[in-house]
Image: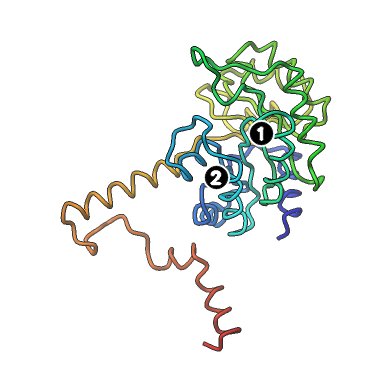
Amino acid sequence: MTLTERRLRFRELLAGPACVHPGSVFDPISARIAEDLGFELGMFAGSIASLTVLGAPDIIVVTLSEFADQIRRITRAGNIPLLVDADHGYGNALNVMRTVEELETAGVAGMTVEDTLLPRAYGDGRMQLLSRDEGLGKIHAALAARRDPATVIVARTSAVTATSLDDAVARARLYTEAGADALFFTGISTPDQLAALHAASPLPIILGGSDGDLGGKPGMAAHGVRVALQGHQPFMAAVRAVHETLKALREGTAPKALTNQPSADLMKQVTRDAAYAKATKDFLGG
C-alpha cells in the first residue's frame, strides 16, 4: 500500500459515521501487532516518542529528526495508517513547515499541530496557549508545506482546560476556516462541552483521552468524533514486562521457566518470518 493510499484510508475513516479507538504504537513490532489485530489507525504520541527514543518524560526534549527517524521505522514495517502528535511543530510557523516536510516524508497519514506554548516557558509551569493569531499562522504554514494533498493536517488545542470553552470554540472556528482537515481536543469531560465544539465546526473531531462519560463510541460519534484516544498503555505494559523479566532473570529464574514469553508462532508472525523466508528462497536459492 502506498503512503497516499494509507492517507486516503485515514480520510475515509474521518469521513465515515463511526468513532474508532486507534492502536497506540511505538516501534515496528507494535505497529504490526496493531495492524494484525485489525486497528484501523495507529497513533504515535510525542510523549511515547520521548520515552521510546530518549527514555525521558514528556517535556519536549526529543528533536524533530529523532521523532521522524522513529516514525520512518514504524511506517516502513507495515501498512497501518499512522497519526502522529507533532506537538508545537518544533518551533514557530517556519519550523512547522519543516516539521510537515519531514513527517510527511517519513510516511505519516496525518499529524496534529497544537497551539500550546512549548517548550515550557520560564515561570510557574502552568499551561499557556499561543495567541489565536499565532496558532492560526501555524495551521496556515502546515497546510502550505504539505506536498501530498491526502496528508491530514489536524489542528489541536487544549483551550478547554487552559483557557475556556468559549476560547476553544473560537479557535475551532478559526482553524476550520484556515482549512484544517480535522480538530483535536484535549480536556473534554462532558457531553455538553463536546456538543458545543461539534456545533462550532463541521470538521471531524479527534479526542485525547477523557475521564468523562461521553457516551462511549456511539455517543462520541453522534457529536462528530471519529477518533478517540484511549491512552498509551501498550508502551507502559512493555516497560513492566521487560522489568519483570529482567528482575526474574537477575534473581535466578531459569529462562525456560519464564511464563510471560510470546509463542514461537507469534514471533514469526510479528517479524514477518514467512515473507523473509520466501525472499531468501527466491533470491538466495536457499
- For the point 72% across and 37% down, the residue is 17
Q: Is residue 29 above or below residue 206?
A: below
In depth, the one of 99 and 15 nearer the eye is 99
The extreme bottom residue here reads: 285
Q: Is residue 210 above or below residue 258?
A: above
Number of numbered tags placed on the structure image: 2
Mark number displayed over residue 23: 2
In depth, the one of 133 and 155 nearer the eye is 133
Amino acid carrying label 1: it is Gly
Q: Position of residue 141 (x, y in %)?
A: 78, 32
**Pointer 2 local density, CA inside 10 Å: few below 14, some 14–19, many at least 20:** many
Q: Earlier in the sequence, mark 1 or mark 2?
A: 2
Mark number displayed over residue 89: 1
Q: Position of residue 261 (x, y in %)?
A: 33, 58
Measured Cα–Cα span from mark 1 to mark 2: 23 Å
Secondary structure type for disc 2:
strand
**Pointer 1 local density, CA inside 10 Å: few below 14, some 14–19, many at least 20:** many
